[in-house]
Amino acid sequence: MELPGSKDQRVKSARAIQITYYLQTYHSAVQDLIGEKWENEFCKLIHKLQLHQEELQLYALASFSLWRDFHKTSILARGKILVSLMLILLAAILSSSMKDCLRSKPFLGLLGALTICISSVTAAGIFFITDGKYNSTLLGIPFFAMGHGTKGVFELLSGWRRTRESLPFKDRVADAYSDVMVSYTMTSSLYFIAFGMGASPFTNIEAVKVFCQNMCISILLNYFYIFSFFGSCLVFAGQLEQNRYHSIFCCKIPSAEYLERKPIWFQTMMSDGYHHSSHHETDPYQNHFIQHFLREHYNEWITNIYVKPFVVILYLIYASFSFMGCLQISDGANIINLLSSNSPSVSYAVVQQKYFSNYSPVIGFYIYEPLEYWNGTVQDDLKKLTEGFNTLSWIQQYYQYLKAGNISATNKSYFHSILQSSFLRKPEFQHFKNDIIFSKAGNVNSIIASRMYLVARTSEKTQRDVIELLEKLRPLSLKQSIKFIVFNPTFVFMDQYSLSVTMPVLISSFGILLVLLLTFFLVIHPLGNFWLILTVTSIELGVLGLMTLWNVDMDCISTLCLIYTLNFSIDHCAPLLYTFVLATEHTRTQCIKSSLQEHGTAILQNVTSFLIGLVPLLFVPSNLTFTLFKCLLLTGSCTLLHCFVILPVFLTFFPPSKKHHKKKKRAKRKEREEIECIEVQENPDHVTAV
């Protein structure tokens, strides 16, 4: 450090030194390869020096480092994604199983998850055949597609279980399709519209655009695979069930008399559930463990009058934390959140932010037109543009050189003559030769372009000042008489993160408005639309606020997760809400019980398998996967909270009212009694015979 008040202006000590080198490649592909090899060897040399000189802390960052460390995440996550897939398959198998060997559907759960995997692989193949560009953000697509696709699979399976066993299996499959296809078509359309907006030219973040393009293909293929491939699997399983074949071993189930003579283990494996039915339970599918738990235990507990006040308090706590988080959203993010945790780029960025974060990056100031640099007016304009910056400029040094030599260069020829013959030949100024481009027309030399470097003082450990600086410099290049551009490689990321807060909010708001319009035209009950909009807004704001409290920055991954949250919440809440508002039971409590009994199993199966599949992401040493895990965990948890806790309570004391259903039933009952009385009066002999 420089000693204040001392005549000795030499540096006495320094906590850190940052040195920047620029390689000249002359726009040649061969030179680019040579430059990349030189950078690799340089990084290896720094690593060796670090090992031999432990007292020094050396960190290197080259132009290819960010690209290499960004794609390193996909290599590290390959094994974990396979583990995640196995966990999802296991959860689908277990949640589709029953003790009843005839009605258990473990293979349908397995085939349903595999259907989504096959459609995702097909989508990836189509994307890459059409020259799609791969990046590590595409790691979220398998989880996004699985969360939506398995919802359709479990809904079809629940629709099959709601059908009557006495019907032929073809009619049962038709009834299951009629229950599920309309709602799943609508939610798939909303997915396609929301991610189609992200894939449109209006999106200025290339990573988001590529992700949304691949996601649109995945959603489209998911839809066709579920209703074609998985539908055929459902038909085959229905045929086996009608012919009384075992759901696992595919053999004929023996009669009850034969089973009674066999050991208990054999009876357990081959039992078709005939002894489980009771006088008040004629549907064997009601014995599914999730269905039984919801019907016999959870529905009664959540609608209990003593539980409702605690649920209201819980929602107030949830809303307050969400609101507090939304007020603390930061406008900037860090590029290291997209890199693998142990990469050299992260180590360099941490040290750079620690010691040099109170200065902006070195900004290149490029003048791309001939100027009269000897003119005093032009010199004043340049001083105004660079005012407030620490500059490294040939112009400033040259003006000081002329002033020190008491030289007056007020015309073009004299200005250029001294610049080339004297100034640029001095050893201390020779490095400025690369900052000036001369053009010779006859015997006259002209400066057609030049550059300088600017560094601004900013607040420590914040990027907002740098983003504001960038936003002020760029408009100046359009307004000023001097034509110039400013650039730094980090501006690419700053442009992305300066829009990362507004973009998801705008897309989510437009998506909610779109849902409102579509549901008002496509669905018959307006209160269902109203409740859906409130629920989706609550989940979206809850995820956004809790993400902020969990230290999740607004990068491209969290942006995509917020878009997905909108659709995921609609996917699970819409069937539950519309079943409730269209129900005809006597009370709201009975309506919400029937809604949970009809759709609760599919919702719980899907969200549970979705959350279990996220667990392996914790073991990938990458900040990108940590962000993905946090956002998707909050998405699944908030959706589950609203479907099973908040909505079942709030819907019991808010509209729609069910009194008109009571009046209709009473009118029908009175009309039926009057008809019976008339029949009795007209035919007394028939009554006597009875």
Image (tube, helix red, strand yellow):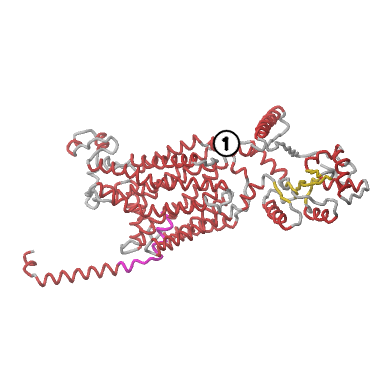
Q: Quickly name the residue at label 1.
A: 72
Looking at the image, residue 460 sits to the left or right of residue 249; the answer is: right
Q: Residue furthest right?
A: 406
Membership of 525 in magenta stretch: no
Return the x and y of residue 180 as percentages of the image width and height. 35, 52
Give the quadrant of residue 73: top right
- Along the line of sight, which residue is nearer the eye, 645 or 498? 498
Q: Is residue 171 visible?
A: yes
Check disc 1 and report its element: helix, strand or loop: helix
Residue at (28% x, 39% y) in the render: 247
Return the x and y of residue 549 as percentages of the image width and height. 57, 51
Membership of 659 in magenta stretch: yes
User: Which residues fall within the magenta stretch?
Assistant: 643-661
Count the numbered circles shown: 1
- Along the line of sight, which residue is nearer the eye, 134 or 342? 134
Q: Is residue 551 visible?
A: no
Q: Residue furthest front?
A: 442
Return the x and y of residue 483 as percentages of the image width and height. 74, 53
The residue type indicated by label 1 comes to Lys
Q: Is residue 371 above or below residue 519?
A: above
For the C terminus, which image quadrant? bottom left
For the N terminus, which image quadrant? top right
Q: Residue furthest top?
A: 52
Q: Is residue 683 above or below residue 485?
A: below
Return the x and y of residue 486 as percentages of the image width and height. 71, 49
